Amino acid sequence: MKIYFIRHGKTEWNLESRYQGAGGDSPLLKTSYQEMDQLAAFFRAVKFEHVFASPIKRARITAERIRHQLEVVPEISLWNRLEEFHLGKMEGQKFTDVQKQFPEQFNNFREHPEKYDNHEIGGETFQQVVARIIPAVEMITSDYPRDDQKVMIVSHGAALNALINSLLGEKLADLRKRGGLSNTSTTILETKDQGQTFSLVKWNDTQYLSRKLDSTDTI
């Protein structure tokens, strides 16, 4: 079966290069709704068995808007396990301000997940985020075991990046080696053994978006 991992549409804080975790939820940009429509049109004929989404507003709205435009409208479930990182003191701050205040952890969060220490900042570690979300994927792959089945997961950039790379068997130190995930992007994984192993079909696909992306789109 295949899992389509969708990052939510772009928000004001994304545009301003601010940390936006589970405790923050700035409004989606007006242009983001058009981009959700472009994604929905691209996958319109794909039959999704179910949509699973983070309950945080930016992800929930993205999931709802996309699913209602599919030819076969799937049911949706909102799962807390699919929330973004809890970011502690970084929440809502600009990247540049966090870099000045917590230079070592700023660098570790972006480049060295295995060294990231949340004691000073609070929130979750990469290990905690992965441990939180993996059971959701296990339940999904158990419920949809057939090779022809497809499900959609709509969640958040940092959490999805950590999750997807973990499912692909990457070590903690290598979670960032493929780069980031863009707003309204699609990454597709396939499993033929009910979630025991996964293979990468597509990474961070945005071919359906009409706009040229910039650095604020990808984390």
Image: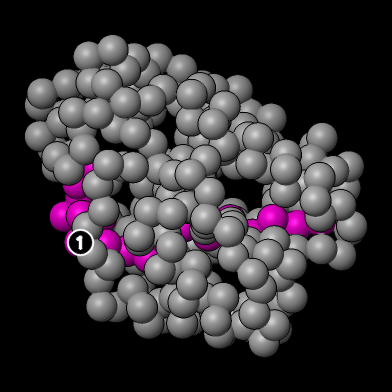
Depth check, front residue: 179 or 198: 198
Residue 182 placement (x, y as % from top left): 42, 57
Query: What is the crowding at mark 1: few (fewer than 14 residues within 10 Å), some, or many (at least 20)?
Result: some
User: Which corner quadrant holds the N terminus?
Assistant: bottom right
Above or below 38: residue 57: above
Q: Position of residue 70 (x, y in %)?
A: 62, 82
Left or right of residue 69: residue 197: right
Q: Is residue 176 left or right of residue 191?
A: left
Which residue occupies 20% across, 61% down? 12
Q: How many marks?
A: 1
Q: Is residue 124 magenta?
A: no
Residue 39's place in the image compared with 166, above or below, is below
Q: How is the image coloured?
A: one colour
Is 6 colored magenta in this rendering?
yes
Residue 204 appears in view: no
At x 79%, y 40%, the residue is 195
Residue at 43% across / 63% down in the picture?
60
Residue 63 pos. (x, y %): 49, 67
- The local secondary structure at tag 1 comes to helix
Horizontal and vertical percent position of residue 105: 27, 20
Q: Quadrant of residue 112?
A: top left
Q: Quadrant of residue 163?
A: top right
121 relative to 42 in the view: left or right: left
Asked if residue 86 is positioned above or below residue 189 in the image, the reply reads: above
**Start-end of magenta stretch:** 1-19
**Image point (46%, 77%), residue name:** 65
Amino acid under label 1? Glu
Q: Note whether residue 144 is visible.
A: yes
**Residue, disc 1:** 12
